[in-house]
Image (cartoon, rainbow, N blue to C red):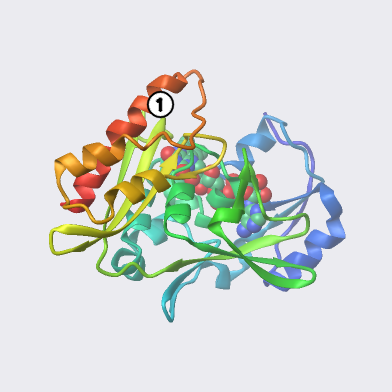
């Protein structure tokens, strides 16, 4: 179907975009890569009167080093994030998970900010942002604010981005020297996650000194697997430790039942994939 009629605005700065958003009122929609928004418009599930395209704001595509953080512009396409040397070196888990998103076409158009703002619980990047304690920089008419990942994901397709606000940057602490793995289970290649597990470990000799674990599609938001993390820390990096920790994978989850999988099957997957991801991250 063809989308309903809308006005199109292409600002060249964040300030212009915020002003355009304010002027357009609650009936405006931000366009990033369009990989989720355009299908929604074409199916007429939404009919905004104004589309504000962030594609003309070059600054929002930048990936840079900022002290102990890697700062990624909201409009950085998945392809750039996946291949960026700073990301590969300091936030390896993000690079690994981004490589599993969809196919090359979608990865060239879709953006990190768009995916996180969309907050689909089956999306692969929310669990990574949550496990790695990313910070979200959000711009609005009254300035800029920063929200931690634990407050950013509010509910099903709902984030802390308020009306009239734009996500401009996602900042990841550096995890230099950590090992990591993203274990994704999907029905067909290039499809969304039925369930997936993001793991980053700091190994000290043969033991696990620190662990970060996030779950995809095990609730209405990405979920931090704190029980798994606690069970791993201080353990030797072994198959037994991975198996024991994986038993905690469903704590605090509320797995959905849908056409892809029943909740109890997803819970089984969460345990199995957690064990695999920990072992792969531990090498
Ligand atoms: C065939 C297909 C397969 C896919 N498979 C996967 C997959 O396996 N894993 C996965 O994680 N994702 C997958 N995706 C989604 C992909 O990751 C997209 O990047 C993501 O859905 C949206 O990113 P986008 O940049 O295209 O955002 P858009 O579609 O442009 O926007 C999405 C939503 O976020 C809002 N928004 C966008 N940017 C901002 C911003 N800066 N500030 C505030 N609001 C904003 C928009 O208004 C809109 O509501 C798939 C998509 C397709 C089409």
Q: Residue at x 55, y 51 (%)?
A: 116
Q: Is mark 1 on a helix, strand or loop?
A: helix
Name the spot of residue 184 as percent of width and height, x first: 34, 38
In this rendering, does residue 68 appear at all? yes
Residue 241: image location, x then y, percent? 20, 43
Is 48 above or below relative to 219? below
Residue 144 or 8: which is nearer the viewer? 144
Q: Seen in the image, is 217 located left or right of residue 6?
A: left
Front residue of 198 and 44: 198
Where 41 sits versus 159, above or below? Answer: above
Looking at the figure, which quarter contains the N terminus?
top right
In the shown orientation, is residue 137 left or right of residue 211? right
Give whichever of 219, 22 is nearer the camera: 219
Residue 167 sits in quarter:
bottom right
- Residue position marked by numbered label 1 in the rendering: 266
Q: For the image shown, how many numbered marks are present on the structure?
A: 1
- Which residue: 74% across, 55% down? 162
| Left or right of residue 261: residue 7 | right
Q: Where is residue 66 in the image (x, y as percent from the top left)?
A: 46, 79
Classify mark 1 as within 8 Å of ligand 1 or not, answering yes or no: no
Locate residue 19: give its quadrant: bottom right
Mark 1 closeness class: few <14, some 14–19, many ≥20 residues within 10 Å: many
Residue 31 showing in the rendered view? no
Residue farthest to the bottom?
A: 67
Residue name at image x 26 percent, y 43 percent: 277
**Side (left or right) of 97 relative to 48:** left
Q: Where is residue 249 in the image (x, y as percent from the top left)?
A: 37, 37
- Which residue is depicted at the point 44% across and 44% down? 124
């Amino acid at each position: 179907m063809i989308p309903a009629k809308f006005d199109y605005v292409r600002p060249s700065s964040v300030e212009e975009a915020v002003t355009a958003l304010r002027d357009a009122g609650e009936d405006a929609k931000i366009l990033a890569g369009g990989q989720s928004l355009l299908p929604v418009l074409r199916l007429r599930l939404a009919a905004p009167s104004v589309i504000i395209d962030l594609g003309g704001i070059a600054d929002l595509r930048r990936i840079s080093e900022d002290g102990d953080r890697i700062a990624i512009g909201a409009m950085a396409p998945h392809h750039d994030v996946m291949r960026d040397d700073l990301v590969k070196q300091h936030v390896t888990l993000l690079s690994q998970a981004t490589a599993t998103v969809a196919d090359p076409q979608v990865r060239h158009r879709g953006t990190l900010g768009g995916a996180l703002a969309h907050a689909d619980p089956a999306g692969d990047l929310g669990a990574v942002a949550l496990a790695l304690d990313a910070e979200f920089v959000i711009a609005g008419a009254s300035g800029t604010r920063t929200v931690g990942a634990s407050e950013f994901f509010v509910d099903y397709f709902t984030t802390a981005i308020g009306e009239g606000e734009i996500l401009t940057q996602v900042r990841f602490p550096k995890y230099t020297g950590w090992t990591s793995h993203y274990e994704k289970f999907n029905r067909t290649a290039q499809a969304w996650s039925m369930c997936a597990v993001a793991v980053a470990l700091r190994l000290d000799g043969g033991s696990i000194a620190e662990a970060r674990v996030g779950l995809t599609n095990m609730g209405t938001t990405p979920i931090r697997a704190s029980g798994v993390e606690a069970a791993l820390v201080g353990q030797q990096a072994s198959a037994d430790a991975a198996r024991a920790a994986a038993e905690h994978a469903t704590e605090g989850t509320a797995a959905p039942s849908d056409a892809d999988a029943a909740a109890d099957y997803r819970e089984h997957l969460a345990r199995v994939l957690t064990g695999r991801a920990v072992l792969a991250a531990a090498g």
